[in-house]
Every structure is written in structure tokens, then in C-alpha cells.
Image: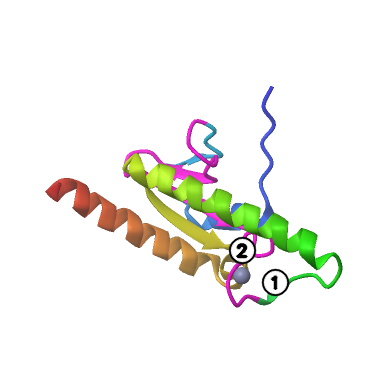
Amino acid sequence: MMSIHFTRPEMALMTALRGLAFDTQVRGLPGTPDIVFPKERVAVFVHGCYWHRHFDCAIARTPQKNDYEWLRQFAKNARRDQKVVSRLRNDDWWVHVAWECEINRDPELVAQEIRQTLARRATYQKTA
Ligand SMILES: [Zn+2]
């Protein structure tokens, strides 16, 4: 029995992507992408700014205590994220990272960017 739990930003983004055909939390792909458009081969990760170290973001500020342990863990997360993205790209997927703070600010704008990526991908597939 598989239980599916969505974070608040994931929910907000999925709501904003209404009308589009996508799968969620696809375990068959590297990194278990949060939102996947199989037809266009576009994988979306909804990244929490803190754990995934969103650059120059207020949510991502490094904690004061146990700095070394945190930095080690963050470096590990970043390495894993990079590995996941290259594995997907090698397998002809396009990867879109949607940040928590951007979704909190304006989920419709993030959804619009994803729709643009899908449109670009569709054009690319036609000409490829
Ligand atoms: Zn952020």
C-alpha cells in the first residue's frame, strides 16, 4: 500500500497546473520527480528552499548551531540533486525545478513557466 503525501507548495502548484495531464511522485524515474509530464518528457521537482539550498533565498539561511553537520548534509543534498538531474537529462528528460518560495509567492506564475517549458519541448520534439 503506497501512501502519497503532498507538501503545501506541491499542492498549490498542482492546483495551478489544472487542465494538464501529469503524474505525481514517479518512483520509476531518478529522484522520484514530484510532477511528471510523460508525453513531453518534462520532470518537475518542487524543492524546499531550506533542504535544497535555494541560492540567495531567505528560507535557505544556514542554521547557527552545528554548522559543520548542516553544511555536510546540505552538500550531500546538492550532490544528489545534481546526480538526479544529469541522469534524467541523459535519458532525454527536461528538468524544471520549482522553488518553494516562488510557489508561495505566485503559484500561477510558476505554473505559467512550466506551461512554457512544455510548449518549448513540444516544438523541440516536432523538429527533432
Ligand atoms: Zn527560495
Residue 15: quadrant of the picture? bottom right
Apparent side of residue 101 relative to residue 22 in the rendered image (left or right): right
At mark 1, the secondary structure is: helix
Q: Residue at x 66, y 36 (%)?
A: 4
Q: Is residue 53 magenta-colored?
A: yes
Q: Considering depth in this image, is 77 or 124 the residue closer to the camera?
A: 77
Q: Is ligand 1 less than 8 Å from the beta carbon at label 1?
A: yes
* Proximity of marks 1 and 2: CB atoms separated by less than 8 Å: yes
Residue ID for mark 2: 100
Apparent side of residue 52 relative to residue 120 in the rendered image (left or right): right
Q: Is ligand 1 less than 8 Å from the beta carbon at label 2?
A: yes
Q: Residue at x 52, y 60 (%)?
A: 98
Q: Is residue 118 magenta-colored?
A: no
Label at residue 59: 1
Label at residue 28: none
- Amino acid of disc 1: Ile
The x and y percentages for residue 82 are 50, 53
